[in-house]
Structures are given as C-alpha cells and as structure tokens.
Image (tube, rainbow, N blue to C red):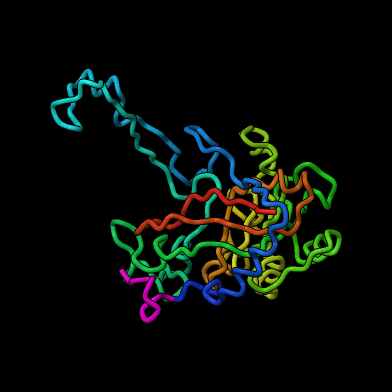
Amino acid sequence: MTDVTDPRTAPDIGPIARQTPADVVAAARLVREGRMISLAAVRYPGMPLFPGHPPFQVLNYRTPRGIRVTGAQPWGPINDAGLGYMAEYVMATSHSGAHVDALAHMTVNDDMHWYGGGNADEHLTDFGPTHLDASTLPPFFARGVLLDAAGHRGVDCLPKGSPIDAAELDAIAAAEGVEVHAGDVVVIRTGYMGLWPDAAAMAAHKTPGPDLSAARWLLERGVVATGTDTETYEVQPAPDPGPTGNPQPVHTLLLIQNAIYLMESLDLEALARERVHEFLFVALPLKIRGATGSMVDPVAVV
C-alpha cells in the first residue's frame, strides 16, 4: 500500500489535495458562534439503507454476565472486584447512514476502472481495493454551503425521482444569497431525511437529487466534495443515462472521472430549519484499508 503521508509517493486524491493551510484558516474564520449542528442520524440495526448494501448490525461479543458464566479471565485469574466489560461487533457496510465514498467505490466500463488508474484486474483483492481505498480518504475541513432545494420549492420533501438541475441550483444560490467557490463542500437538501426513519414514506419519495447538469455546475465552480440527504446522492432513476444506459451518470462524472467526493444520507434538516447556508464543514473519515468508504458524523460549525 502506498504511504499516503509521504508526499513523494502520495497518490492523486483529487482537487481536495490543493487545499492550502491558508484555506483551512479561512474556513475556520467562518465560525462566529462556536455552535455545532450534527449532520448525521443515529445508526441502528434495521435502519433504512440502499437495498444493495448489507444490513447494519451490532452484536455483543463480551458482556459482564457472559464473562462470569463462561469463567473467562481477560485480566488473568485474580479479579475479586468483579470487574467486567462490554464489547461488540459492528458489522456493516462503510456506506451506512451518513458516509463518504472513497474514490475506489464506483467502477465503470469493461475494465472496471475507477479514478486514478485503479482497475479490478490489477487493484482489487479478496480484502478490498489496494488503490485509493478508504485509507486515502482526506479530512474535510472547509467552507460548507447548503443549497435547500426542498425549501426553495416550498415543500417538505421533493417528489419521487425529481431532478435538481443547474438552473435550479443557480436560483437557489441567488435566493439564499450565497456563492459557491472553489474548495467548497456543497450539500443539497431534498427533504428526504425529514422522513427518517419511516421506511414507507422514504420509499414513496425515492429518489430526488442532482442531475448531470447540476453535477457540471458543481464541477465548474471547483467544489471538492458534495453531499445530499438521500442514499444515492443523485436523482434515480437517472433522467440522462446516455447511450450506454448508465444508471448513475453523476457518480461517473464526479467520483470516477473527477475525484469529487460524494457524501450520502446527510441529515440537513436542522441546517434548513435554522436557515444556515454558509458554515464550517467538518468530517473526519476513518482510514480503513480495503474499505470503499467511511461512515462519518459530520458537523456544521457556525
């Protein structure tokens, strides 16, 4: 595995690598109140997930009663204090709840390639990808911008399969009085997480989101990451799949071709209620070798 801490061997992790110390300081200056707004819902067994992912599960591995009944001696034979502990397995996809996709998450074409020259024949093992996996995910500490599509349309949640296009993003930004700059993290609210965790209500609204024109709009403005409050980021089914019938052309354009990190299942309801449209965005992915993404608990700091 390449040493991502060594600038001589660090892989191309996309436009976010151009962030400078001055950019970090500028983002920190957005904090005026010192208040943090969580952008993640609680994860739990049975939680709603994209249907192609394995279920989220928490299982006990050690409990105080189990230690006593089995006569286990994790500290050795002497424990007159009766000290016990609890430990568990968390078995889940890294794409459970609020999360960020690693650059190795999505592949395209017959060679099954992803950003930066990765491909399944050369870089995919029984233990995950070896090129641009989650171990190379960067920290996100940048200016955040909320574009509230549901609020702009005056609805609680966008309708099922409703696309958000470039013209609408322009209109939302103008109405909110914000501009999107190079280096930003842009989060787009459809209202979907306002239905959480009602699986039936969520199914009735699957899945609004940005279309290809919106993706190009974000690219033109130089964002380093973008997220929505749905499990698929982009509108589904894709209204613009192209001649090959690509079911996720936005992922292809942003993640595979341009290394723009995608975040999904962000809870943007509190931000929208408080009409916070500019903030410090902070998310720290877990560096797990072979994983194709990371659960995150991002915050907006205002």
- Side of 66 where 23 appears, left or right: right
- Magenta span main SS: loop
Residue 298: image x %, image y %?
57, 51
Q: Quadrant of the N terminus?
A: bottom left
Question: Considering only vertical position in the picture, is 255 above or below 90?
Answer: below
Q: Quadrant of the C terminus?
A: bottom right
- Side of 6 where 198 appears, left or right: right
- Side of 153 where 45 appears, left or right: left
Q: Residue at x 23, y 19 (%)?
A: 68
Residue 29: image x %, image y %?
68, 64
User: Which residue is situated farthest in the left direction here?
Assistant: 77
- Give the magenta part as a residue range: 1-11
Q: Residue at x 61, y 34 (%)?
A: 197
Question: Considering only vertical position in the picture, is 30 above or below 158?
Answer: below
Q: Residue at x 20, y 32 (%)?
A: 74
Location of residue 120 by image quarter = bottom left
Location of residue 24 by image quarter = bottom right
Residue 151: image x %, image y %?
81, 49
Does any portion of residue 216 appear in the rendered image?
A: yes
